[in-house]
Amino acid sequence: MNAVEEWQTELDAAGELTPGIVDAILSTHGERGAKAIEAVAEARVKEYNDFTVVVGHSEEHVVEDGGCQCRDAQYNLDPDDPTERCWHALAVAIAQRVDEVDRHDMWYSDVREFL
């Protein structure tokens, strides 16, 4: 089991961010992990009928199937390395495990037209 699978398994079992799990996320993902935890704490992970979205400070990022199309994920990270995920994808993985996803019964594609 790799480091990502370990913290995810621990988080699945605990259902909350414990100090040990936070340490594991931070040691595995560094600053990206810290940003992800912050986004979850600030309820910036939104789930719509069609997408899960993480609200950043300047734009929103769609996360699908554990991946994101942000510049960091596209240019800086190895998609085959599970320890290399952008903070948006990490935030979704964390929020889902601690039931902190802000769910909206609407289509993001419809909401996006108004933004």
Image (tube, rainbow, N blue to C red):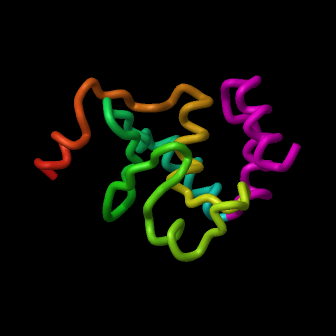
Please say if 80 is above or below 100.
below
- Residue 79 in percent (x, y) is at 63, 62
In percent of the image, x 38 and y 55: which residue is there? 61
| Residue 62: x %, y % from top left | 39, 50
Q: Which residue is pictured at 88% across the width and 43% down the height?
A: 1
Left or right for 73, reference 61: right
Is residue 29 found left or right of 47 in the rendered image? right
Q: Which residue in the rendered view is the most extreme toward the front? A: 80
Left or right: 31, with 25 as reference point: left
Count of numbered labels shown in the rendering: 0
Look at the picture and state if 103 lies above or below 84. Answer: above
Q: Work out whether residue 62 or residue 26 is closer to the camera in this orientation and state it.
A: 62
Residue range corresponding to the magenta coloring:
1-30
Q: Position of residue 108 (x, y in %)?
A: 25, 40
Residue 8 belongs to magenta span: yes
Q: Which residue is painted at 56% across and 51% down in the image?
A: 36
Which image quadrant for residue 102? Answer: top left
Q: Residue at x 72, y 32 (%)?
A: 11
Majority SS type along the magenta span:
helix
Q: Residue furthest bottom?
A: 75
**Residue 18: which quarter of the image?**
top right
Q: Is residue 61 magenta?
A: no
Q: Residue 76 in the image: state x and y as whole percent.
A: 58, 75
Residue 28 placement, left or right of 39: right
Q: Residue furthest right?
A: 1
- The image quarter in which residue 21 lies: top right
